[in-house]
Image (tube, rainbow, N blue to C red):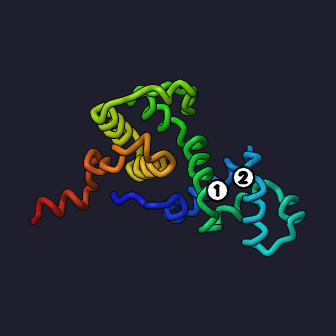
Amino acid sequence: MAFETTLTRLWKRLSREERLAAAQHFWNEPPQALHATALATLVDARHLRPQAARALAKDQQARILAGVLEPGEPLAGYLLATLHLGDRRELLKVFLDAVGLPHEDGVLKPESDSVSFSDQALEAAVRKIAAEFPLAQVELYLNTLHLQDPDRWPGLAHSSEWLPRSAGTQAEGVSR
């Protein structure tokens, strides 16, 4: 697993269904700071007038936004976060519990900033979620965490060493 180097590149790697799920969660409660950016993205993508983009139903806005492959770093980062806070919240909770960070339903609490953890705790947390969730979801989550806060999660750059290899990779290793 090679980490993507930008949130936009990571967003592009998502399947259409994953991008749609993220966009749907985004439009349920769009943050004020990114609402105008998201509307401008819709305007550009479909050559709409701003008032027409605002008037679209949320599901239409989500479908259009999901089709945009380059929404910009801030919006891509928030969309990736909403994907995990929506359909994949259980993965977040299991990971944060395993690494020992205080959270409320998968959202870090302010006091978590002062909590430190060892590389061994991080490795154990990565191995735990890799055993309980689909590997592609785990890799996406780890890459998202690393890109959103590389100072807090520098150890995640080595997380591929802690993940199981795919069956195809293992079979290749045995036959050589």
Compared to residue 108, the image places residue 84 above or below, namely below
Residue placed most toward the observer, 106 or 112: 112
Neighbour tally class for label 1: few under 14, some 14-19, many 20 plus, Cα within 10 Å: many
Q: Quadrant of residue 95?
A: top left
Can I make out residue 137 in this image? no
Residue at the spot 61% in from the left edge and 52% down from the top edge: 79
Q: Which amino acid is tagged 1?
A: Leu
Residue that extends furthest to the bottom in the rendered view of this protein: 47
Q: Is residue 28 left or right of residue 146?
A: right
Residue on which the image places disc 1: 75
Residue at the spot 18% in from the left edge and 60% down from the top edge: 171
Can I make out residue 19 in this image? yes
The C terminus lies in quadrant: bottom left
Tags 1 and 2 touching, CB below 8 Å: yes
Residue 175: x and y in percent read 11, 64
Residue at the spot 50% in from the left edge and 27% down from the top edge: 112
The N terminus lies in quadrant: bottom left
| Circle nearer the N terminus (1, 2) | 2
Q: Is residue 78 left or right of residue 94?
A: right
Tag shown at residue 29: none
Q: Is residue 118 left or right of residue 96?
A: left
Residue at the spot 50% in from the left edge and 30% down from the top edge: 113
Residue 162: x and y in percent read 27, 45
Neighbour tally class for label 2: few under 14, some 14-19, many 20 plus, Cα within 10 Å: some
Compared to residue 46, the image places residue 112 above or below, namely above
Residue 105: x and y in percent read 57, 29
How far apart, in angstroms, are the residues tagged by discs 1 and 2? 7 Å
Q: Which amino acid is tagged 2?
A: Leu
Q: Quadrant of residue 42?
A: bottom right
Tag 1 secondary structure: helix
Residue on which the image places disc 2: 34
